[in-house]
């Protein structure tokens, strides 16, 4: 193992959203063994060690231009056709990489015009690219099937194909793609952009010294939750506003059983709950920026609802599992990696409201089953996502790249 390797992790942010948090966790796990590593960002929201904002390299003016352009693209195009990214504004990060004699570049979520597609192709050292969504191997979309209900304008389709072809032409064979979930790994292997590249499945790591089950009664008391009532937890970046996360399906399912059981829905991650969702009792915690507080919230609840229509390997599900929280969700995409049906939770067929309602009721009315699933969840978390296991997988890739 070569601990002296100089590694740059590139990520748009260090904290803003699930992809940024996942990227920084990978960085922290690997930094323990590759100490000469830096986390290079466009938007840093913390002052943690070894985080470098590209503004420090004289990129301040470009940051302003690229942010303005990206915001306008998503305001006038993405708002109608779902969020998209182009990554076409020229950038000179490849020159910085060469100037600073970096050995390996580890890309994460680098959209919002942080680095251009052309510039990625100019990087002169090996690249490892963790797939936090589908954008690296698709056209302009981050999740290619989330807008099937919308009819794309022909210009959008042309733009999508243009970006797809640009990636095919600019991405080199120096890139190793890492899929956190088995689903996104397969998608990358099947993509016309990446089907000739090396694509490996390595999950996100989770630190079990930080994420563990606390005493549930103490946790309930902390949030003033009644001990005799059940609590269904839902959480996502942006709260309930993202249709991809499936909060609407969850509410429809729980509405079917609301008169049979005494339970509450607890939501975190966003500010507002739309009126259409308020047909059952919802406790809105809002944004939580403390891992300690979030761990306590997981421990205070009885089941976690991971009801995404499409997802990679959501951190909320990983955290809930590590804290011993059984989950309900659908047999789809990366959710299959997190929920073992009838062992750590309940998987309904996509996207059956009735089956989800049945699963929620089945778990909420069986305390013995919840206790057993809680133990199984913790065991699965340690087995599948422990930091040492993930570190060794990345070590193998890093060290082979510089032999």
Image (cartoon, rainbow, N blue to C red):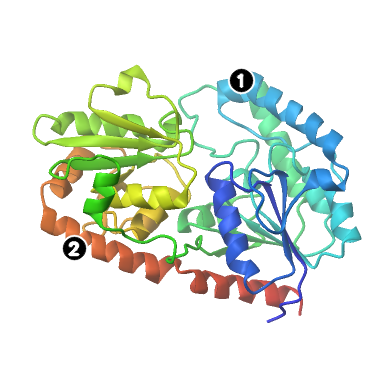
Residue drawn 63% across the image and 48% down it: 14
Residue drawn 8% across the image and 34% down it: 260
Foreground: disc 1 or disc 2 = 2
* Mark 2 crowd level (few <14, some 14–19, many ≥20, 10 Å Cα): some
In the rendered structure, find residue 372 and report the number of the disc placed on it: 2
| Left or right position of 99 against 288 | right
In the rendered structure, find residue 245 and report the number of the disc placed on it: none
Q: Are marks 1 and 2 in contact (CB under 8 Å)?
A: no
Residue 89 screen position, x and y as percent = 81, 35
In the rendered structure, find residue 153 and report the number of the disc placed on it: 1
* Mark 1 crowd level (few <14, some 14–19, many ≥20, 10 Å Cα): few
| Left or right position of 43 against 54 | left
Give the residue furthest to the left. 260
Q: Is residue 241 above or below residue 224?
A: above
- Mark found first going from the N terminus, 1 or 2: 1
Residue 138 screen position, x and y as percent = 62, 43
Quarter that holds the C terminus: bottom right
Please say whether residue 313 is visible from this viewpoint: no
Please say whether residue 300 is visible from this viewpoint: yes
Quarter where residue 235 is shown: top left
SS class, disc 2: helix
Q: Is residue 365 above or below residue 283?
A: below
């Amino acid at each position: 193992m070569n601990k002296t390797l100089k590694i740059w992790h590139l990520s748009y942010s260090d904290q803003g959203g699930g992809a940024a948090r996942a990227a920084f966790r990978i960085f922290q796990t690997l930094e323990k063994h590759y100490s000469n590593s830096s986390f290079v960002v466009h938007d840093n929201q913390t002052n943690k060690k070894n985080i470098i904002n590209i503004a420090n390299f004289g990129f301040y003016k470009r940051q302003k231009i690229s942010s303005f352009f990206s915001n306008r693209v998503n305001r006038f195009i993405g708002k109608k056709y779902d969020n998209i990214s182009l990554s076409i504004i020229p950038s000179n990060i490849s020159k910085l990489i060469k100037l600073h004699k970096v050995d390996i570049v580890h890309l994460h979520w680098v959209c919002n015009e942080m680095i251009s597609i052309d510039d990625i192709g100019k990087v002169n050292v090996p690249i490892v690219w963790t797939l936090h969504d589908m954008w690296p191997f698709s056209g302009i979309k981050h999740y290619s099937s989330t807008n099937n209900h919308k009819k794309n304008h022909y210009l959008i389709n042309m733009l999508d194909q243009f970006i797809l072809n640009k990636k095919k032409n600019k991405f080199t064979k120096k890139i190793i793609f890492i899929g956190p979930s088995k689903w996104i790994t397969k998608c990358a292997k099947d993509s016309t952009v990446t089907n000739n590249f090396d694509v490996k499945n390595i999950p996100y790591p989770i630190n079990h010294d930080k994420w563990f089950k606390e005493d549930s009664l103490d946790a309930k008391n902390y949030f003033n939750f009644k001990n005799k009532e059940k609590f269904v937890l839902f959480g996502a970046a942006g709260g309930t506003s993202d249709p991809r996360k499936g909060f609407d399906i969850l509410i429809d399912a729980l509405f079917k059983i609301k008169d049979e059981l005494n339970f509450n829905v607890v939501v975190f991650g966003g500010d507002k709950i739309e009126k259409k969702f308020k047909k059952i009792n919802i406790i809105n915690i809002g944004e939580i920026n403390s891992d300690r507080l979030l761990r306590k919230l997981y421990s205070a609840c009885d089941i976690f609802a991971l009801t995404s229509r499409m997802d990679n390997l959501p951190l909320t599900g990983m955290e809930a599992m590590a804290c011993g929280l059984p989950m309900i969700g659908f047999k789809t995409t990366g959710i299959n990696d997190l929920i073992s049906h009838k062992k750590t939770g309940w998987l309904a067929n996509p996207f059956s409201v009735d089956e989800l309602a049945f699963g929620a009721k089945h778990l909420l009315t069986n305390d013995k089953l919840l206790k057993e699933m809680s133990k199984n969840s913790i065991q699965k978390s340690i087995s599948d996502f422990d930091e040492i296991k993930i570190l060794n997988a990345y070590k193998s890739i890093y060290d082979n790249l510089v032999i």
